[in-house]
Image (tube, grey):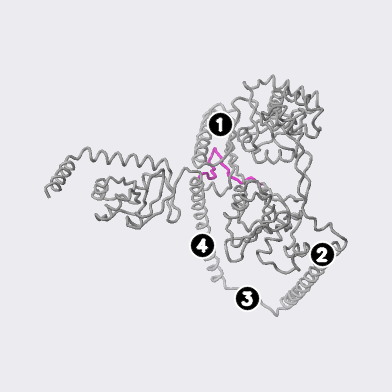
């Protein structure tokens, strides 16, 4: 089942068509991006097909779009950057769905869906952007000098403090990262943060730094954002292979992978390897079933890898000793002739081997029970199910059950000879059209070249003198343009900073740590009628509380408003009046917040703390005001004798 979409030219919405085995089962016009995601998830489509993935938005918007899908692939039917692109009108003509004319959005969505069903196009694999922050020393210390030790202590302590500050800054904003560092005698010699976010989102959090002793570099990791894989390409046999992966994270990371027979599939190490790079390496070899560590508790990086791959996490009861790691490496070297080149490869191999040894008995029992009832190609599935905790009997029964027969997609290019001839004729017409277009471009270039040659001849003969502005005018224009460039750069940097803060605020809002409140100019009947909710509280945010008549005050009290947030601190008289109404006042200076247009995105914990403080002040006000009690008594007597 395929969902084909195409963006409408004048609207921020799409035409959508759902096909089941090439037959249209649903159409939609002017469908928003949120509705497309809901439609794809409710119909459980296998793929979303379109002619250009950037119709969804930029790279971050595409990542966000795919992250909200329940397993559906993203398919670009018109080609890939590596292989070139084919117009959608040509694809529609080859499929017999058009005569080669420009297609309307609804027809384009239909052609995209049918093309993907027929195996035309590329599946898009998406990788998250990464940024590396490196802290290193700038000064080298030799063997002599009375102050060398003091300088070394100062430098290692400075790197340690700066590492703590960067880690706290990233953690406070909920940014995902890995930290690797090298310890020294007096602190940290060097540290590396692998941050799983684009460089632009770190503005305002971390900046490059260069002092006499410390160097801080912030640079994006050069890795591909998208990979285009032909959807008709058969899966490699190794992609079905389950792996036990040992990881030794640090400044230099070791990586080892064993199959479920204990054979070494991969053994390597490298400086600055990130979780994304490990994931891509594993994807080329198979599927991770277990991630293993050689120490207990396991490092944070190994835990995150296991969580992101939905794999099991293995850690020994006690950290493996160096002598045992060396013995394990020697055994694998003698049995499989694969040698660990350094301690990092040795440690990762020991972690994977220790995990394999812990499952060895179950795996041997699985082989013994299943060898006569399960196809050898299904043996890895039985082993994987047993390692995940399934009983051997259930695992064998599950593997012995024949899989459902796959649905056959229509094959428009494998029909009769007449169909083949039509397809080839259409390709020939396209080639002739393209040839005529290229010839026209060539003639145009030839004419342009000849004109330039004539101008060059005239210039050499002195017939044409180039007109240049005088030096004063030239300098004035250069200064004007330079100042304009500087101003635009400053505005761009400011806009990037504001955008990064807004993005962080929206992420905190989505995670539930913050809530949004709309701003009103003043406390009015309109604001009272539409308060914002947080933790079963009704909250209003206003610019100021300069005036508050009795009618508005009574209406606020009757509406059950739990708190009023004001941007400027109100006067003492206004504060006393709100206390009499028992309505807490909270100023923005007491909260952690971010402004986005008319909205205030407020940290939930800071709101609860400020609200508790304001309520305590109201309680103390009534407790320490006997005049208030006498006033209530007098009002009661007047009402009684009236």
**Residue 483: image tag:** 4
**Residue 255: image tag:** none
The tag earlier along the polypeptide, 2 or 3, is: 2
Tell me the residue that label 3 is attached to.
Answer: 467
The quadrant holding residue 346 is: top right
User: Which residue is at 71% across, 61% downward?
Assistant: 111
**Residue 427: image tag:** 2
Q: Residues within 10 Å of mark 2 (few under 14, many from 20)?
A: some
The tag earlier along the polypeptide, 2 or 1, is: 1
The mark lying in front, picked from 4 and 1, is: 1
The tag earlier along the polypeptide, 3 or 1, is: 1
Instruction: Compute the Cα span from label 4 to label 2.
Output: 54 Å
The mark lying in front, picked from 2 and 1, is: 2
Tell me the residue that label 1 is attached to.
Answer: 188
Instruction: Compute the Cα span from label 2 to label 1.
Output: 65 Å
Magenta stretch: give its range: 205-222
Q: Are marks 4 and 2 in contact (CB under 8 Å)?
A: no
Measuring from the top left, give residue 164's x and y in whole percent.
51, 35
Under circle 1, the secondary element is strand
Measuring from the top left, give residue 421's x and y in whole percent.
86, 64
The answer to whether residue 267 is seen in the rendering is no
Under circle 2, the secondary element is helix
């Amino acid at each position: 089942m395929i969902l084909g979409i195409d963006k409408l030219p004048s609207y921020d919405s799409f035409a959508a068509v759902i096909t089941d085995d090439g037959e249209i089962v649903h159409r939609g016009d002017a469908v928003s991006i949120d509705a497309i995601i809901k439609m794809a998830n409710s119909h459980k489509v296998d793929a979303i097909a379109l002619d250009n993935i950037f119709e969804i938005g930029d790279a971050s918007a595409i990542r966000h779009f795919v992250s909200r899908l329940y397993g559906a692939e993203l398919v670009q039917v018109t080609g890939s950057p590596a292989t070139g692109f084919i117009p959608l009108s040509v694809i529609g003509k080859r499929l017999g769905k058009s005569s080669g004319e420009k297609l309307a959005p609804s027809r384009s969505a239909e052609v995209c869906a049918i093309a993907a069903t027929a195996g035309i196009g590329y599946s898009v694999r998406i990788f998250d952007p990464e940024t590396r922050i490196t802290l290193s020393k700038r000064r080298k210390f030799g063997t002599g000098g009375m102050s060398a030790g003091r300088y070394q202590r100062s430098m290692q302590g400075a790197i340690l403090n700066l590492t703590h500050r960067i880690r706290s800054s990233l953690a406070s904003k909920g940014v995902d990262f890995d930290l690797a560092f090298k310890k020294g005698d007096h602190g940290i010699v060097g540290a590396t943060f692998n941050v799983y976010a684009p460089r632009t989102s770190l503005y305002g959090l971390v900046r490059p730094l260069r002092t006499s002793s410390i160097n801080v570099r912030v640079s994006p990791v050069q890795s591909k954002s998208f990979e285009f894989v032909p959807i008709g390409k058969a899966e490699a046999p190794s992609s079905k292979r389950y792996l036990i992966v040992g990881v030794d994270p640090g400044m230099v990371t070791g990586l080892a992978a064993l199959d479920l027979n204990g054979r070494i599939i991969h053994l390597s190490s490298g400086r600055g390897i990130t979780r994304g790079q490990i994931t891509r390496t594993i994807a080329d070899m198979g599927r991770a079933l277990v991630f293993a560590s050689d120490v207990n508790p396991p490092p944070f990086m190994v835990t995150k890898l296991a969580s992101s791959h939905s794999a099991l996490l293995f850690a020994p009861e006690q950290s493996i000793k160096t002598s045992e790691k060396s013995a394990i490496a020697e055994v694998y070297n003698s049995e499989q002739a694969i040698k660990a080149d350094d301690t990092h490869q040795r440690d990762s191999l020991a972690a994977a081997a220790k995990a394999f040894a812990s499952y060895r008995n179950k795996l041997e029992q699985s082989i013994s029970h299943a060898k006569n009832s399960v196809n050898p190609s299904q043996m890895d599935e039985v082993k994987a199910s047993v390692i995940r905790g399934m009983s051997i009997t259930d695992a064998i029964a599950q593997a012995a059950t024949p899989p459902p027969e796959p649905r056959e997609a229509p094959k428009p290019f494998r029909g009769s000879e007449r169909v083949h001839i039509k397809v080839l004729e259409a390709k020939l017409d396209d080639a002739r059209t393209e040839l005529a277009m290229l010839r026209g471009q060539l003639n145009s270039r030839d004419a342009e070249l000849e004109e330039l040659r004539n101008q060059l001849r005239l210039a050499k003969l002195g017939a044409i003198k180039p007109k240049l502005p005088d030096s004063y005018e030239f300098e004035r224009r250069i200064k004007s343009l330079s100042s304009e460039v500087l101003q635009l750069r400053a505005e761009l940097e400011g806009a990037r900073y504001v955008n990064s803060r807004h993005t962080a605020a929206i992420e905190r809002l989505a995670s539930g740590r913050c809530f949004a409140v709309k701003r009103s100019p003043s406390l009015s009947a309109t604001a009272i009628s539409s308060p914002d909710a947080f933790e079963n509280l009704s909250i209003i945010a206003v610019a100021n509380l300069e005036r508050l008549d009795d009618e508005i005050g009574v209406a606020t009290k009757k509406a059950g408003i739990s708190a009023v947030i004001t941007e400027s601190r109100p006067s003492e008289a206004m504060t006393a009046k709100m206390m009499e109404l028992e309505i807490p006042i909270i100023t923005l200076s007491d909260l952690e917040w971010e402004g986005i247009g008319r909205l205030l995105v407020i940290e939930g914990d800071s709101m609860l703390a400020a609200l508790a403080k304001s309520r305590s002040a109201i309680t103390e006000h009534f407790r320490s005001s006997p005049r208030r009690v006498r006033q209530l008594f007098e009002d009661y007597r007047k009402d009684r004798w009236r």
